[in-house]
């Protein structure tokens, strides 16, 4: 929810609040209520009429919905939940404690209860978990005019009537129909001539990110979700797909900086949660860094002989890590958006070698005079040569890690900057002092 | 375009290719043609009928469109461009060389030419640059039935008829109408009773990312774009908004790893372009790193006295940089999605201090035994104390940089990991050797 796009009541007077409650967009009303204590929010919510109240409620942050759910009477909760969209309903249900789930389930109408229980069985992050079962159905032998009448009747309970679906007697998907096509068609035209016969679809297990990618690729308003037998069981709409894309990008940002993913809003995230998500990799990377330390210990005599070498140590290992971090991040993002595929690895490696060689040569040329100024030609040679090789290796490692991780069926986003940095640190230390030993004849 | 979602002809036989040309989704056909040499692609494209050909053409990568445009006869180009969507048309026009632009403009119908020229004047990255002028208009005194008839007539040339707009005599936006509402309404109901009277809108200058955020916030299908006088001049649809969100996230990924932003597809990006986008920050950061080097030079006598101190140097500055990188990335993303606002800085700083203190204390406890093992209690104290302070400071710097950059009206995404790392390196070196001097009485 965007902090700077929020809308609020004109002032704190009763009239302004009442006007806002009556006319504000449900999303704006929800954002405003979520800033209050739960009891105050409920006092205002309970005064709204049923449809609007459900509409506002389902736009509240999920945690706030749970708090409210436990604050209000079970009957009130059942009334709201019964009027919610199917996908928002199950999202709330999944967050309630077991006792509250049982009570709510008992209070709901049987068809609503069954639908909710079914939707709640799907794995988080799958099409089943984000779909809604509120889709519009048409028969293949309807006329365009009859279909529009049917949609008029179905509309109040459906997520959208702009795209409806045609199924056979066994509920298997046979086609999809745009309202656009129905409007433009002759009233007597049959649905089976107007429908698209083999619509793009996904299955219950399809990853939510792939669902969102398909919706984006074909500019769809909605995509049908099928079960193992080809039966239509739900749809995912474009707005939910956009939310998924945003959440997936945020998760990749977290991973790329070695933070274990979390979905809480950054403004409200707790100290304990942030600590637990950040400490793991920080602690692990300490042990990775010991490798660099060991390298340095091995070369203690070189350091004692040429202390000025230490001057360049942070510079070299940072440069190598920075270059590797650039490669890794670009590749992680390209893999995530589908710009590149795993099969492109060899071509990309060759290109990376060319780019990294150019980068390394440039940076070697930049440090050469610095090395000469600090310690003469030998130091200049040592530092430049190390810079070139370290940037080259760091970049190749950075570029390759996401592919290697993918092939090992691990998440490429974990090939984060700091991970790449730590690896190239270790290599950089060994490289530097080895080259120094050779050039300086130690 | 997602490499692994592509669809291709069943095989290379003429029949399979002909079937694919006839029945494939325009997006899939475009993706397949873009893999061929330009002349082959044109040979296949020219055989399609006008509407389908334009539909496929506008889905080709922009660079490929430009290549094709210069390969085909000007008359053919004018025919295709005249049939394209208004927003795709101007995107192509803006990429053509001046001579080609003039020729194309002369060959187009006057109304199309004027519309294209007008759209081409808007700044890149603004609402004006991504909007289409193909929106549907209704009169306030139409009936629902009359409106549906009007939309039936307007439909072929419009981006969407699911959302239409009501304007007054001066073309100023007065309301927006959902087709859903028209379908459900009584045939005689007037538009001015069915419309939403003050729809969310943006201006020509609104940043494309803010346009996309509004569309996402309110789950809109389309959003109207107004000029300075409140006149409706275009709309931006949800699918273009989703593309903007993806592109903006990709740009942030590039910036966060100190790569100057670029829009080319990673698979096809050239060596020269990648080099130029990556070398700038890598070279600049070298000079940042010299600061750490200078710190080390200042403390050369400490190093000579206690060479084992150098063992921990990479570990300490990396840990500080990693922690800062985590903070910076989380904050950059939170600012970009609107989870936090600039005004939240003080609260967030306090929370970050608490989290960073906990992280620093944990990591200090981890390195303490390592320090004791390498060099006794004094080294252990030095290293632990430095770790605690370095992680604390690194985190606070990392968290604050995006806010400081924002307040200076600079892009917070530039507060990348490596930038934060370089700053905390310099501070870390000074901190480490100063603490060492004090603890070890040098």
Image: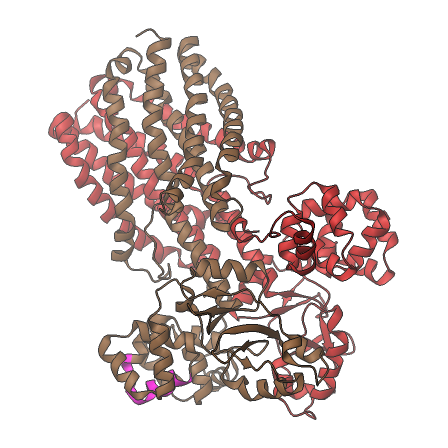
Chain colours: A red, B brown
In the image, is B51 to the left or to the right of B293?
right
Residue range corresponding to the magenta coloring: B70-83
| Vertical placement of residue A294 versus B211, above or below | above
- Whole-percent x and y of residue A177? 65, 79
- The quarter of the rendered structure image containing the C terminus of chain B is top left
> Residue at the location (33% across, 40% down)?
A322
In the image, is B193 to the left or to the right of B7?
right
Q: Residue A311 falls in which quadrant of the image?
A: top left
> Residue at the location (42% across, 46% down)?
A401
| Vertical placement of residue A369 versus B432, above or below | below
Q: Main secondary structure of the magenta part?
A: helix
Q: Nearer the viewer, residue A131 or B266?
A: A131
Q: Residue B392 falls in which quadrant of the image?
A: top left
Q: Can I make out residue B338 in this image?
A: yes
User: Is A17 covered by the magenta stretch?
Assistant: no
- Whole-percent x and y of residue B58? 42, 77
| Vertical placement of residue A201 versus B384, above or below | below
- Whole-percent x and y of residue A308? 20, 22
So how many labels did they put on this image?
0
- Whole-percent x and y of residue B119? 37, 74
Q: Residue A374 falls in which quadrant of the image?
A: top left
Q: Nearer the viewer, residue A122 or A64?
A: A64
In the image, is A154 to the left or to the right of B372?
right
């Amino acid at each position: 929810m965007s902090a700077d796009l929020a809308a609020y009541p004109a002032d704190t007077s009763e009239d302004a609040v009442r006007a806002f409650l009556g006319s504000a967009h449900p999303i704006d009303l929800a954002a405003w209520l979520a800033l209050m204590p739960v009891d105050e929010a409920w006092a205002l919510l309970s005064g709204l009429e049923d449809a609007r109240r459900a509409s506002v409620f389902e736009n509240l942050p999920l945690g706030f919905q749970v708090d409210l759910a436990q604050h209000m009477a079970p009957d009130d909760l059942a009334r709201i939940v019964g009027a919610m969209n199917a996908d928002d309903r199950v999202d709330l249900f999944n967050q309630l404690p077991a006792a509250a789930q049982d009570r709510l389930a008992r209070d709901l109408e049987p068809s609503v209860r069954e639908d909710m229980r079914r939707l709640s069985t799907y794995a988080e992050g799958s099409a089943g978990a984000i779909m809604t079962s509120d889709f519009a159905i048409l028969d293949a032998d309807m006329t365009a005019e009859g279909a529009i009448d049917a949609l008029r009747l179905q509309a109040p309970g459906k997520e959208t009537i702009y795209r409806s679906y045609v199924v056979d007697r066994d509920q298997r998907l046979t086609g999809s129909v745009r309202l656009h096509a129905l409007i433009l068609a002759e009233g007597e035209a049959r649905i089976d001539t107007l429908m698209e016969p083999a619509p793009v679809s996904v299955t219950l297990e399809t990853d939510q990110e792939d669902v969102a990618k398909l919706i984006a690729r074909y500019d769809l308003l909605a995509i049908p979700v099928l079960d193992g037998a080809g039966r239509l069981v739900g749809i995912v709409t474009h707005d939910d797909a956009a939310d998924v894309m945003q959440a997936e990008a945020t998760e990749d940002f977290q991973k790329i900086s070695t933070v274990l993913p979390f979905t809480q809003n950054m403004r409200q995230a707790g100290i304990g949660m942030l600590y637990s998500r950040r400490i793991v990799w920080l602690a692990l990377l300490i042990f990775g860094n010991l490798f660099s330390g060991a390298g340095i210990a091995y070369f203690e005599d070189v350091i004692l002989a040429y202390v000025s070498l230490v001057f360049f140590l942070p510079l070299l290992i940072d440069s190598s890590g920075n270059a590797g971090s650039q490669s890794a991040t670009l590749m992680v993002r390209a893999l995530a958006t589908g710009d590149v595929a795993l099969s492109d690895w060899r071509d990309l490696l060759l290109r990376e070698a060319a780019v990294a060689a150019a980068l390394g040569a440039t940076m070697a040329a930049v440090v050469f005079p610095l090395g000469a100024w600090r310690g003469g030609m030998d130091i200049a040679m040592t530092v430049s040569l190390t810079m070139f090789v370290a940037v080259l290796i760091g970049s190749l490692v950075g570029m390759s890690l996401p592919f290697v991780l993918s092939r090992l069926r691990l998440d490429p986003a974990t090939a984060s900057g700091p991970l790449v940095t730590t690896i190239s640190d270790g290599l950089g230390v060994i490289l530097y002092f080895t080259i120094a030993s050779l050039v300086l004849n130690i």
